[in-house]
Structures are given as C-alpha cells and as structure tokens.
Amino acid sequence: WYRLWSDGTLEQGGTGIATGTLTFPIAYADATYQFICAPIRVDISNGTNDINWHTKTTTNIGVEIRYNGTCQIEKQYDWYSIGKSSI
C-alpha cells in the first residue's frame, strides 16, 4: 500500500519476503527516507533472530533475515517507509 500526501510526503508499507530486494510501488525523491521492518514469524526456541536492510536506493531496498547468523530464505516480514516522493 502507499499514501501520497499533498505536501509530497510518501508513506508505503506491506509484506515482503527475505532474503531479497523489496521494490517500492512509488520511488522516493532521494535515499533519505526512513525504513522499518519486522519479521512476521521467527524461531525463538534456540537462538537469535536478526533482520537488516542494505543497499538502499530511491526505488528499492535489500532486506535480510538471519537466524543464528544464517540467512533465512523466504521468511516474511512487515515493512513501513516514509519520505519525500519523486512525483
């Protein structure tokens, strides 16, 4: 989903799948937007979980979930971002 405000502020959010690249529905004007993400389901029985973002551009961002240091492919996460729209 996304919401574009009259002052040019752009909010976007949804559910993504790690490990990979999340492409935004609408590009940001620059890479100074804020990005928050949280795993939907994690295994807390024996270890630690981490979720990180990397490779931040105006159109996409890389997201990675790790369990005990190992990448967790195809784990879902919720995300939210806010910044200045490119349109």
Image: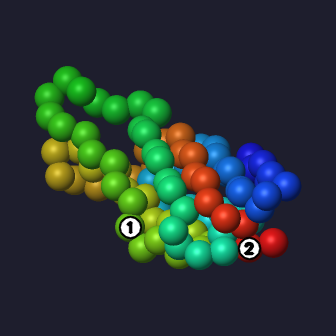
Q: Residue at x 17, y 52 (%)?
A: 69
Look at the numbered disc 1 and give the secondary structure of its residue.
strand
Q: Residue 58 at x, y = what percent?
A: 59, 74
Residue at mark 1 to residue at mark 2: CA–CA distance:
21 Å
**Looking at the image, is mark 1 or mark 2 nearer the viewer?**
2
Q: Residue at x 64, y 44 (%)?
A: 14
Q: Mark 2 points at which residue?
A: 86
Q: Residue at x 68, y 50 (%)?
A: 11
Residue located farthest toward the right when viewing the structure as drawn: 6
Q: Name the residue under label 1.
A: 54
- Determine if residue 64 is in view: yes
Q: Which of marks 1 and 2 is nearer the N terminus?
A: 1
What's the amino acid at mark 1? Answer: His
Q: Considering only vertical position in the picture, is 26 above or below 51?
A: below
Neighbor class of circle 2 (other Cα within 10 Å; few <14, some 14-19, many 20+) is some
Of 47 and 54, which appears nearest the observer?
Answer: 54
Name the mark on residue 46.
Answer: none
Q: Considering only vertical position in the picture, is 16 above or below 20?
A: above
Q: Considering only vertical position in the picture, is 12 above or below 77?
A: below
Of 4 and 14, which appears nearest the observer?
Answer: 4
Neighbor class of circle 1 (other Cα within 10 Å; few <14, some 14-19, many 20+) is few
Q: Is 3 left, or right, of 37 in this rendering?
A: right
Q: Is 4 left, or right, of 12 in this rendering?
A: right
Picture quadrant of residue 75: top left
Residue located farthest toward the top when viewing the structure as drawn: 45
Of 6 and 40, which appears nearest the observer?
Answer: 6
- Determine if residue 72 is in view: no
Look at the numbered disc 2 and give the secondary structure of its residue.
loop
